[in-house]
Amino acid sequence: MPTGTGGSPAEHVHGPEETIAVRDNTAARRYEAVRGGQVVGIMIYERTRRRIDLVHTVTDPEHRGEGVASVLVRTVLAEARAATLPVLVICPFIESWLQRHPEQTDIVIAED
């Protein structure tokens, strides 16, 4: 899984020498994007046995435009795909992002 087991972060290269790590903070029910030891973005979720609902995505204002939210979305979708867990998108940013990346919609479901 992209976020690893035990909360170990998955890393994504960002820029020439930076990485964005994504970790699942299950106690807070959010994924966290971490760069240089600091949380620079979060994605709030609700998980059930049947699916994961992606509720809200926030990027630190100082890091907007750097791809932080995109790394969060790609990582969370990859993890859900690996776990065969359908995704319900509530977050407007993710809805917009998926319109630009329709190849990532294979696990997205409509509201029941």
Image (cartoon, helix red, strand yellow):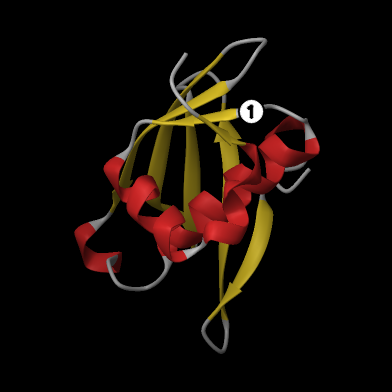
Picture quadrant of residue 54: top left
Q: Position of residue 75 (x, y in %)?
A: 61, 51
- Up the image or down, 9 lies above or below 86; here it is below
Q: Position of residue 84 (x, y in %)?
A: 77, 30
- Up the image or down, 18 lies above or below 16; here it is above
Q: Residue at 47% across / 13% down in the picture?
A: 112
Q: Position of residue 103 (x, y in %)?
A: 61, 59
Picture quadrant of residue 86: top right
Q: Left or right of 32: which side holds 10?
A: right
Badge 1 amino acid: Pro
Nearer the observer, 72 or 108: 108
Q: Quadrant of the N terminus?
A: top right
Q: Left or right of 67: which side holds 17?
A: right
As helix, strand or loop, the secondary structure at mark 1 comes to loop
Q: Position of residue 62 (x, y in %)?
A: 23, 66
**Residue that label 1 marks:** 86
Q: Could one spot residue 8 in this view of the protein?
A: no
Q: Could one spot residue 58 in this view of the protein?
A: yes
